[in-house]
Image: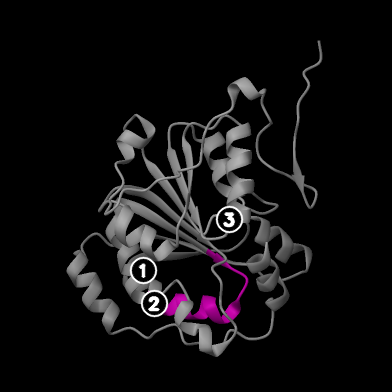
Amino acid sequence: MKKNTKIEREFGVPIPGEILEPARWARTALKKLPADGPLDVVALFGRHAPLVVDLGCGNGRFLIGSALQRPEFDHIGNDILPMVLRYATRRGNQRGLGNLRFAAIDAQRFVSTYLPTAGVREVHCYHPQPHHDPHDAHKRLLTPLFLAQVQRVLEPGGRLFLQTDNAPYWKYLQGVVPTFFDFHEQPGPWPDTPRGRTRREILALRRGYPIYRGWGVAKKELSSDEAAALAKNLPAPTFNAGPRCQDLDRLESES
């Protein structure tokens, strides 16, 4: 008997996994966070496992794929846009992913309050908003102090993965990220997702925009205090984001 598979697509690119029968669905929404943190990740997932975090996870495409490919890892994504999180949780639920959770919270608070020190194997941050209006530059996520916080939560050997289609943002990151991470640029698409890890990447590629990618290993010889002190002497992300990709940025913020 032929198997009845249900596969979703987004701009022609399949969403990872198949929609299962409802009896096999999971519950991936993390509806309640502790009042003062941090998260008890072992209690949340019911096991000890490496933790993968996606900051600003959007509709969950990357984390869903990772959770399917790496069932031995646990995954948490956050976003502040309710609509995209509804897509993320629905898709995670329908694929029966017990190793996946999504939380409605901003990345700054999530990292600083809820992630345990040296408790995360990987942190991913794809296409953070560049905020083209100069008056909104203070809203940019990847500041030196925030990168120091990410360095704090990564376990020894833990990795940070970054990606953007905004050239000025990337130039800024090239200057500050190596303070906290042994940083390497990724010359092409990520091997596991050649057609795009995220919805935004797929959209940018369809329009011919260049994508800038890289990853870094946390410098664990830096204590949290040392990293914070270094961060205070680094420039803030006050760059001019330029006109390119503003259409995609508006689309993302309105999704």
Q: Is residue 131 left or right of residue 178?
A: right
Q: Amino acid at mark 1?
A: Leu
Give the Cα distance between marks 1 and 2: 9 Å
What stretch of residues is rendered in magenta?
A: 163-176
Q: Residue 151 appears at what percent x and percent y?
A: 31, 62
Q: Quadrant of residue 142?
A: bottom left
The residue depicted at 68 percent of the width and 85 percent of the height is 243
Q: Are marks 1 and 2 in contact (CB under 8 Å)?
A: yes
Give the number of callouts: 3
Q: Earlier in the sequence, mark 3 or mark 1?
A: 3
Q: Nearest the camera: 44 or 195?
A: 44
Residue pointed to by mark 3: 82
Q: Is residue 163 above or below residue 86?
A: below
Q: Earlier in the sequence, mark 3 or mark 2?
A: 3
Q: Are marks 3 and 1 in contact (CB under 8 Å)?
A: no
Q: Nearest the camera: 139 or 177?
A: 139
Q: Is residue 28 left or right of residue 2?
A: left
Q: Residue 244 appears at what percent x and percent y?
A: 69, 80
Mark nearest the camera among 3 and 2 is 3
Packing grade of label 3 (10 A; few <14, some 14-19, many >=20) is some
Which secondary structure, mark 3? helix
Is 168 contained in the magenta span?
A: yes
Q: Is residue 6 above or below residue 240?
A: above
Q: Residue 179 appears at what percent x and percent y?
A: 32, 73
Q: Amino acid at mark 3?
A: Pro
Dominant secondary structure (helix, strand or loop) of the stretch shown in magenta: helix
Residue pointed to by mark 2: 176
The residue depicted at 58 percent of the width and 86 percent of the height is 133
